[in-house]
Image: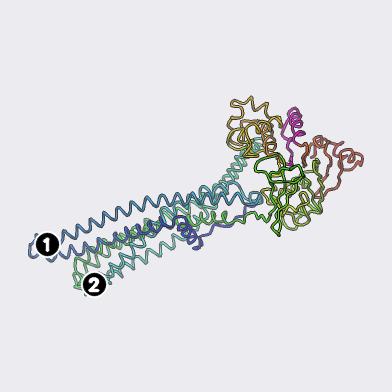
């Protein structure tokens, strides 16, 4: 298991990719939402202008006492401000509703994109990544992205617009006072950079630690019986404590930095407010000449709105600083999500497909539009013609070499010749390469050297989905899915009727116990069929392979989890299932392979003996020693 995963990145390009995807998913709603944010933000800065004008009007009319004339000037301005606020409220409401739709829709599409891409990943990816860590992409990482899109980005845009607008109004009123505010903001930014940088580093680590913690928990849940059988509870607790403590340390340090940031920034803003009030008072007392874009003299009508603008300015800086954590976590989560989305999908250069077929009276093969029980390879040619070849089930491996890790061969110079209808068995110690051979036939992995042919066709030319459709597999580890028994059998061929599923169950010897279940074939299964025995689960898996009606079967320790009595029942069904099919059998229990046409003995990735049971016994080699020395291969 590969546990060394790269640290999530906060590359600015990730933010660009997020925003680009937002616009591609919602090309109309996103611009409307941005307009609403910009409008609401811009109107938030307007009150400063109106306050200055109203105070100036009051100063102008106060000496005369003519409040009736003053009200004619002041009231229209207040009315305009109220209208602007009403429109701004409408814009904020529209923005919040659209943002909710965009956020949830974006996450929905991201999950679908991740899952759809994951279905196309090679088996190797799942063999080398913790399943719990993969699950974390759909939960924790998606949640950080939700916070980024729904909260951090709108707040960042809104606060930035407010800051720019307020800064412009400040410069319009007084350059001197603006410089005082900017000095305070500069101090804020220094502290934000220091604390925010430390917070960001540990939030990134937190995401990685969270994925590792979930991966460990998932492993322990799947292996709970093993943990208890070997009394490994205390060691499991210790291992979990180490991982969980690392998550605690990363989370603690991340939030320690983050929790310090907001109060410090807020109090700097309060200090700056007092400084502006003091400086403004001194400027008024000393009749300091004003420097401004407006050219207005320094008066009380400028100082008072400046105090409000200072609060507004520093408040929005504080809002931005508070979003740093959400932005960093969102980028770290997005980095992990994009990492999964960017995994190289399983390539498929095949063009030969598998089709249902019919043979007319003249022996010509034609394509059928429904399941006929006969299959053919549809082979398009460069000249535009198409030929059909009946699927016979002949599988050959010629001098095949394979290595999971380059330079460390698992199979060396392996040649297998399985004629149509033959039963070929592989025996050997654990790790000899038996299951690897079947993984290569399925193209779960690709060979390093040699050739694998199926009915004379190089399997690289056959589309992987069609190749796998022609191969029925029953594994030692049974996987049942949430749903009814009938649903799990039909998983082998989705268009199969209930009658065909029941016939397959009878063939596998599963019908007897299924009909005794509380709801028969409609009995709900969950948690990998935990309410069934291991043998019953295996029988359903065999029935699932039977309903697929494949021309080639792979039985990987298919009866190893079944008791002797049940094995006899299953074996009769298996014999019927194997009639007329090419069958590859992997077994430790040598008694199950005695009737095989060919038995191949593997040792360290090489075939050291081959022949039928009698021939190998007569040779008195490795197979003879295994058979006569112990019926179970260790």
In magenta stretch: residue 375: no
- Residue 583's quadrant in the figure? top right
Image quadrant occupied by the C terminus: top right
Q: Residue at x 80, y 35 (%)?
A: 592
Stretch in magenta: 551-577
Query: Residue 294, which numbered label?
Result: 2
Given residues 384 and 12, the one toward you in this image is 384
In magenta stretch: residue 552: yes
Query: Where residue 486 sits in the image (x, y, percent)?
Result: 61, 33
Query: Where residue 612 sits in the image (x, y, percent)?
Result: 86, 40
Mark 2 and mark 1 lie on one chain; the one further toward the N terminus is 1
Could you tell me if the residues under marks 2 and 1 are in contact, i.e. CB atoms within 8 Å? Answer: no
In this rendering, the answer to whether 549 lies above or below 344 is above
Numbered disc 1: secondary structure: helix
Side (left or right) of 242 relative to 256: right
Query: How many residues crowd around disc 1 within 10 Å: few (fewer than 14), some, or many (20 or more)?
Result: some
Q: How is the image coloured?
A: rainbow
Cα separation between marks 2 and 1: 23 Å
Query: Where residue 200 sits in the image (x, y, percent)?
Result: 48, 58
Query: Where residue 94 sits in the image (x, y, percent)?
Result: 34, 52
Residue 558 at least partly seen? yes
Residue indicated by mark 1: 70
Query: How many residues crowd around disc 2 within 10 Å: few (fewer than 14), some, or many (20 or more)?
Result: few
Side (left or right) of 524 relative to 104: right
Numbered disc 2: secondary structure: loop
Given residues 418 and 296, the one toward you in this image is 418
Given residues 391 and 10, the one toward you in this image is 391
């Amino acid at each position: 298991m590969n546990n060394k995963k790269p640290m999530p990145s906060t590359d600015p390009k990730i933010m660009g990719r997020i925003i680009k995807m937002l616009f591609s998913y919602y090309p109309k709603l996103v611009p409307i939402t941005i307009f609403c944010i910009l409008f609401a933000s811009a109107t938030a800065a307007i009150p400063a202008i109106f306050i200055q004008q109203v105070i100036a009007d009051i100063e102008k009319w106060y000496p005369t006492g003519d409040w009736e004339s003053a009200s004619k000037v002041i009231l229209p301005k207040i009315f305009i401000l109220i209208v602007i606020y009403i429109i701004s409220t409408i814009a904020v409401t529209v923005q919040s509703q659209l943002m909710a739709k965009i956020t949830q829709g974006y996450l929905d599409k991201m999950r679908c994109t991740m899952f759809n891409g994951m279905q196309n990943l090679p088996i190797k990816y799942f063999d080398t990544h913790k399943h719990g860590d993969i699950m974390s992409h759909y939960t924790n990482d998606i949640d950080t992205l939700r916070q980024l899109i729904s909260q951090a980005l709108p707040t960042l845009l809104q606060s930035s617009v407010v800051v720019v607008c307020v800064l412009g109004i400040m410069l319009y009123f007084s350059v001197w006072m603006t410089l005082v505010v900017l000095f305070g903001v500069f101090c804020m930014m220094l502290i934000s950079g220091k604390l925010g940088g430390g917070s960001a580093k540990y939030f990134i680590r937190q995401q990685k630690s969270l994925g590792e913690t979930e991966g460990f928990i998932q492993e322990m849940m799947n292996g709970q019986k093993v943990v208890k059988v070997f009394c490994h509870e205390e060691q499991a607790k210790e291992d979990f404590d180490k991982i969980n403590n690392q998550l605690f340390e990363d989370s603690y340090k991340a939030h320690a930095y983050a929790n310090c940031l907001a109060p410090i920034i807020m109090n700097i803003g309060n200090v700056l407010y007092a400084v502006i009030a003091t400086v403004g008072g001194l400027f008024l007392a000393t009749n300091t000449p004003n420097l401004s874009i407006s050219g207005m003299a320094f008066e009380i009508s400028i100082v008072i709105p400046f105090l409000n603008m200072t609060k507004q300015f520093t408040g929005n800086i504080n809002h931005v600083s508070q979003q740093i954590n959400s932005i960093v976590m969102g980028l770290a989560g997005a980095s992990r999500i994009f990492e999964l989305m960017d995994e190289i999908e399983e390539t498929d250069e095949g063009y030969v497909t598998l089709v249902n077929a019919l043979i007319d009276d003249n022996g010509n093969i034609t394509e059928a539009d429904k399941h006929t029980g006969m299959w053919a390879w549809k082979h398009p040619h460069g000249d535009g013609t198409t030929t059909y070849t009946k699927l016979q089930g002949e599988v050959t491996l010629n001098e095949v070499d394979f290595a999971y890790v380059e330079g460390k061969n698992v199979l060396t110079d392996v040649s297998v010749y399985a004629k149509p209808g033959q039963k070929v068995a592989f025996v050997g110690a654990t790790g000899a390469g038996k299951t690897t051979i079947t993984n290569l036939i399925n193209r779960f992995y690709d060979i390093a050297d040699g050739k694998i042919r199926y009915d004379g066709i190089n399997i690289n030319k056959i589309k992987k989905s069609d190749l796998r459709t022609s191969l029925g597999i029953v594994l030692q580890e049974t996987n049942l899915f949430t749903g009814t028994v009938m649903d799990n059998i039909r998983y082998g061929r989705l268009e199969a009727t209930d009658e065909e599923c029941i016939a397959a169950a009878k063939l596998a010897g599963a019908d007897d116990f299924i009909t005794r279940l509380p709801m028969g074939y409609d009995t709900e299964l969950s948690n990998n069929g935990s309410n069934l025995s291991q043998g019953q689960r295996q029988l359903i898996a065999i029935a699932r392979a039977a309903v697929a009606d494949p021309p080639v079967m792979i039985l990987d320790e298919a009866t190893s989890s079944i008791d002797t009595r049940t094995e006899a029942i299953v074996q009769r069904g298996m014999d019927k299932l194997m009639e007329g099919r090419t069958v590859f059998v992997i077994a430790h229990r040598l008694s199950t392979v005695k009737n095989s046409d060919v038995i191949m003995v593997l040792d360290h990735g090489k075939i050291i003996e081959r022949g039928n049971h009698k021939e190998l016994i007569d040779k008195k080699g490795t197979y003879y020693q295994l058979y006569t020395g112990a019926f179970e291969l260790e």
